[in-house]
C-alpha cells in the first residue's frame, strides 16, 4: 500500500507539498494521504497553512475521500515533484517475486526521540518573525531553536522549535511555530500531554499560562517564574503535577479571555489563584496581547488582581458531635407511623394484582384527611399520588369507591390529595446498557409539583414504569433511588415507591421473611423502610414490615378484602364464630398459644419477627401437636396477628445471654384465659431478672388506634369511624 515507504515518510512527504496547490491536486493528495494511513488531524494541520484554509471544507473533503483508484503512490509522486526525496530505511526497494513466505506484520516503530531531534536545530535569534511579533524576552529566545533549511523535517524549515518538558524534567515533545500565520504543530510521535516550558526562576511563585508568548510576557513584566503549557487543555495536567511536587508554592492561572470558568475549576481543585482579563476584551485575547498593547505595568496589575476562587462545599460534610445533648436533632418523623419515614424513600413490594395500588390510594386519602389506616396513625399532610401504570379513569374510579365506602365527601380532598396521570411519559429515570443514567423531564416536573404544593407524602406507582434502566444494575438502581431521595428532601416528605416482584419470588414465596423485592440488592439497601404485601392460600392479605432503618419494625398486619369492599383489618371478631371456620380458628389459636407457653417454659422463646430464625412457625413446625393444626407459614402469621389484635398476645423486649436486645411473644392475662391456662402471678412492679435465655420483665399491654381500614362497624357504634 505504501510502495515500500513507511508511514513516517508518508507524513514527511505530505509536509513537503505546499498546502496552497490547486483544488484537484489537493484532492488527489488527500486521497493518497488517507490511503497511506495519515489521520485527519495531521492532514488538517498541513492544510491550516493554506491562506484559503476553511476548517469545515477541509473536514468535509476528508470524509468524501473513499477507497478509490487514487492510492498512496500519488502522494509520493506529487511530493517528489516538490523536491521530496526518500532517505534511510524507507527508500523504495525493487519489487520482485519471491517464494519466501510472508513475514508477520512488525510492531510499529516507536516515536521519534524529541531530544535527538531538538539537538539538530539551530539556535533561535531575535530576528525570527514570531519573536518580533510576540516581543519575546531575550532569555526566552535562548531556550528556543529554529529548524534549519537542510533538516529532514522539510515542512518545518524556518519554523521556531519550542521544547516541552515532562514533570520529570525530560524533554518529551517539541512545538513548532510557523514564522507567519498558521497553526502550531507538535512533533509527530512525541507526548504533548503534561508537557510544559518553565521560564525564569526554578522555584518560587509560579504563573501558569497557555502558550509561549503568554509566559514570556509574564516573565518580562515580573521577572518571576512563568510556565507555558502548550494549550489550554494541558493546563490542568501541568498544575496537578506542579502541586504534587510543590504543595505550598503559590500558583496563579492566567487564562485567555473566555476560558475563565475552566481555570476557576482547576484553581479551586488545586488551591490556586486566577487572574482574569477584563470582560471587555474579545474572546481569546490573552496576556501576551495585553503586554504588547499596554506594557508590563498593566500585566503586573493583572497578576496582582488575582483572587482565590471560592472553595466548593466538601463532598464529605462534617457533622457536629459536641452538642448532641444540648442541641439535639429531632427524632425521625413518619407520614404513616413507623412505616414511612419523612425525608426518606420507602418501598412497598407485591406481586401484580395483590392490591398495593388500592392500599396506596387508601393511604393517600387517609393522610390527606389525617385519619389512621389499619389502626396506624397518619400525619395530616398534602399528598401527591403519581400514577404511572394506571390511567386517570381507573384511579378516579378507585377513589370514588373509597369515598363511597368511607362516607367521605370528595370536596374534603380538594387541595389535599393531588393525583397526576403520567402514563404517557412514565419514566422518571432512564439509562442505556451499563451507563449511569439520567433524570427525565417527568422527574423534573415531579420535583416542581412537590415543591409548589408543599407535599408531605408522595406515592409513585410504580417502579417498573418509573425506572427506565436495568433492575439488576446496582449503579443504575442506586442512582434512581438517590434521585427519589432528592425529592424526599425537598419538603421533608415521605416517598413510597410501589414495586412488583418477579414471578419466581412470588411463586416460591422467597419474599417471606425479608426479600420482598426483585433485582439488585440496591433496591433493599437504598430504601430506608420496606414493606411487602402477600395473599395467603385462604385469601387473606399480610402486610409485613421487612426493613426499618429508623426504628423498630412494626408487627405484620392481617387484612381481609371482602366482596364489594376494601382491605380492612381482621379483628378479634374474626374468632367469634361469625365466619364459617370461626370455631376451628378459635381452637387453633388456643392450641398455638399453649405451645408458645410450653416452649417458653423450656427457655425457648418465639420471636415476633417473621424473618427471625426463631419465629413461631420455624420453632414449632417439627412438633407433633403443631403439625396436627395443619398450619402453613401464612396461616400461622395470620392467626398470630389476630391473637395480637385480640390482646391475647404481645411482644416483650428482653436481652439474651449476649446482652443484645431481642423480642419474644408472651401471652397476656386475656390470652392465658382464652387458652385455658392459669396466668402466672405478675410482679407488683416492673422487674428484670436474668435467666438462661436472657433478661425478662413484666410486659406492658400495647394500645391500638382505631380508624379507617379497621373492620367495618355500624354507623352508630361508639368505636366506629366518625363522619363529620
Image: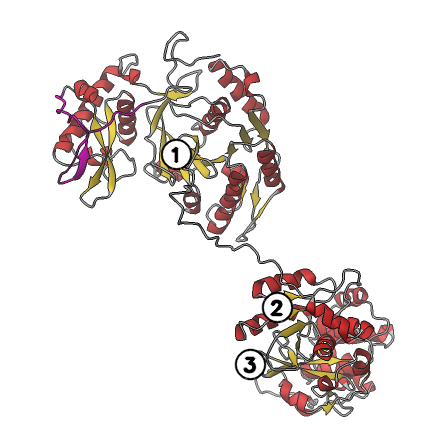
Residue 700, magenta (yes or no): yes
User: Would residue 96 be seen by someone viewing this image from the given angle?
Assistant: no
What range of the chain is rendered magenta?
677-703
Does residue 464 show up magenta in the picture? no
Q: Position of residue 415 (x, y in %)?
A: 58, 24
Marks 1 and 3: which is nearer the front?
3
* SS type, badge 1: strand
Q: Position of residue 460 (x, y in %)?
A: 52, 34
Mark seen at residue 683: none
Question: Are the residues at dot 1 and dot 3 in contact (C-beta closer than 8 Å)?
Answer: no
In the picture provided, is 583 more to the left or to the right than 420? left
Magenta: main secondary structure equals: loop
SS for dot 2: helix
- Residue linked to disc 2: 236
Disc 3 on helix, strand or loop? loop
Binning the other alpha carbons within 10 Å of mark 3 as few (below 14), some (14 to 19) or many (20 upward) gives few
Q: CA distance from mark 1 to mark 3?
A: 61 Å
Which of the marked residues, 3 or 2, is nearer the chain's N terminus?
3
Q: Quadrant of residue 600?
A: top left
Residue bearing the label numbered 3: 168
Q: Residues within 10 Å of mark 2 (few under 14, many from 20)?
A: many
Amino acid at each position: 500500500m505504501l510502495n515500500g515507504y513507511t508511514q513516517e515518510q508518508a507524513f514527511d512527504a505530505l509536509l513537503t507539498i505546499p498546502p496552497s496547490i490547486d483544488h484537484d491536486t489537493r484532492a488527489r493528495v488527500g486521497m493518497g494521504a488517507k490511503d497511506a494511513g495519515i489521520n485527519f488531524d495531521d492532514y488538517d494541520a498541513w492544510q491550516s497553512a493554506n491562506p484559503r484554509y476553511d476548517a469545515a471544507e477541509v473536514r468535509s473533503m476528508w470524509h468524501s475521500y473513499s477507497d478509490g483508484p487514487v492510492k498512496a503512490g500519488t502522494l509520493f509522486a506529487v511530493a517528489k515533484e516538490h523536491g521530496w526525496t526518500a532517505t534511510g530505511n524507507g527508500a523504495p526497494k525493487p519489487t520482485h517475486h519471491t517464494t519466501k513466505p510472508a513475514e508477520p506484520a512488525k510492531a510499529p516503530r516507536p516515536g521519534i526521540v524529541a531530544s535527538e531531534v531538538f539537538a539538530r536545530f539551530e539556535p533561535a535569534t531575535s530576528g525570527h518573525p514570531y519573536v518580533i511579533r510576540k516581543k519575546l524576552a531575550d532569555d526566552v529566545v535562548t531556550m528556543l531553536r529554529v529548524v534549519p533549511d537542510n533538516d529532514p523535517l522539510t515542512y518545518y524549515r524556518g519554523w521556531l522549535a519550542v521544547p516541552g518538558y515532562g514533570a520529570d524534567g525530560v524533554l518529551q515533545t517539541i512545538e513548532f511555530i510557523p514564522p507567519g500565520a498558521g497553526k502550531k504543530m507538535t512533533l509527530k510521535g512525541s507526548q504533548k500531554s503534561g508537557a510544559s516550558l518553565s521560564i525564569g526562576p526554578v522555584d518560587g511563585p509560579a504563573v501558569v499560562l497557555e502558550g509561549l508568548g503568554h509566559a514570556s510576557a509574564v516573565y518580562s513584566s515580573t521577572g518571576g517564574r512563568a510556565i507555558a503549557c502548550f494549550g489550554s487543555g494541558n493546563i490542568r495536567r501541568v498544575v496537578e503535577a506542579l502541586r504534587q511536587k510543590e504543595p505550598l508554592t503559590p500558583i496563579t492561572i492566567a487564562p485567555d479571555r473566555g476560558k475563565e470558568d475552566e481555570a476557576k475549576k482547576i484553581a479551586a481543585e488545586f488551591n490556586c489563584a486566577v487572574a482574569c482579563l477584563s470582560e471587555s476584551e474579545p474572546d481569546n485575547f490573552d496576556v501576551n496581547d495585553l503586554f504588547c498593547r499596554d506594557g508590563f505595568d498593566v500585566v503586573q496589575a493583572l497578576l496582582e488582581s488575582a483572587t482565590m476562587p471560592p472553595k466548593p462545599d466538601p463532598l464529605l460534610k462534617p457533622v457536629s458531635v459536641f452538642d448532641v445533648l444540648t442541641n439535639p436533632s429531632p427524632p425521625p418523623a413518619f407520614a404513616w407511623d413507623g412505616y414511612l419515614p419523612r425525608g426518606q424513600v420507602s418501598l412497598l413490594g407485591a406481586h401484580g394484582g395483590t392490591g398495593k395500588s388500592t392500599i396506596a390510594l387508601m393511604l393517600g386519602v387517609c393522610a390527606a384527611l389525617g385519619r389512621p389506616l389499619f389502626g396506624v396513625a397518619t400525619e395530616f399532610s398534602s399528598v401527591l399520588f403519581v400514577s404511572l401504570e394506571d390511567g386517570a379513569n381507573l384511579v378516579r374510579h378507585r377513589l370514588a369507591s373509597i369515598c363511597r365506602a368511607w362516607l367521605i365527601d370528595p370536596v374534603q380532598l380538594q387541595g389535599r390529595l393531588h393525583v397526576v396521570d403520567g402514563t404517557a411519559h412514565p419514566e422518571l429515570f432512564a439509562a442505556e446498557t451499563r451507563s449511569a443514567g439520567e433524570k427525565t423531564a417527568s422527574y423534573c416536573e415531579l420535583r416542581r409539583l412537590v415543591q409548589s404544593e408543599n407535599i408531605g407524602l408522595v406515592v409513585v406507582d410504580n417502579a417498573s414504569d418509573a425506572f427506565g434502566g436495568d433492575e439488576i444494575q446496582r449503579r443504575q438502581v442506586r442512582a434512581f433511588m438517590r434521585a427519589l431521595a432528592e425529592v424526599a428532601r425537598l419538603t421533608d416528605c415521605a416517598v413510597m415507591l410501589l414495586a412488583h416482584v418477579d414471578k419466581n419470588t412470588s411463586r416460591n414465596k422467597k419474599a417471606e421473611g425479608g426479600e420482598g423485592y426483585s433485582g439488585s440488592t440496591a433496591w433493599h439497601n437504598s430504601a430506608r423502610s420496606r414493606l411487602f404485601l402477600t395473599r395467603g392460600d385462604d385469601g387473606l392479605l399480610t402486610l409485613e414490615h421487612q426493613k426499618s432503618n429508623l426504628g423498630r419494625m412494626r408487627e405484620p398486619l392481617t387484612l381481609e378484602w371482602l366482596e364489594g369492599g376494601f382491605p380492612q383489618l381482621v379483628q378479634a371478631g374474626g374468632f367469634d364464630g361469625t365466619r364459617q371456620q370461626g370455631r376451628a380458628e378459635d381452637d387453633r389459636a388456643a392450641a398455638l398459644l399453649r405451645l408458645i407457653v410450653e416452649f417458653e417454659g423450656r427457655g425457648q422463646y418465639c420471636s415476633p419477627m417473621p424473618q427471625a430464625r426463631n419465629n413461631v412457625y420455624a420453632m414449632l413446625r417439627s412438633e407433633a401437636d403443631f403439625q396436627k393444626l395443619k398450619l402453613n407459614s401464612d396461616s400461622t402469621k395470620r392467626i398470630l396477628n389476630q391473637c395480637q389484635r385480640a390482646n391475647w398476645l404481645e411482644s416483650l423486649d428482653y436481652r439474651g445471654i449476649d446482652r443484645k436486645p431481642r423480642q419474644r411473644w408472651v401471652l397476656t392475662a386475656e390470652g392465658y384465659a382464652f387458652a385455658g391456662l392459669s396466668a402466672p402471678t405478675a410482679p407488683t412492679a416492673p422487674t428484670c431478672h436474668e435467666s438462661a435465655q436472657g433478661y425478662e420483665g413484666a410486659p406492658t399491654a400495647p394500645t391500638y388506634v382505631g380508624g379507617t381500614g379497621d373492620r367495618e362497624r355500624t354507623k352508630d357504634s361508639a368505636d366506629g369511624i366518625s363522619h363529620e
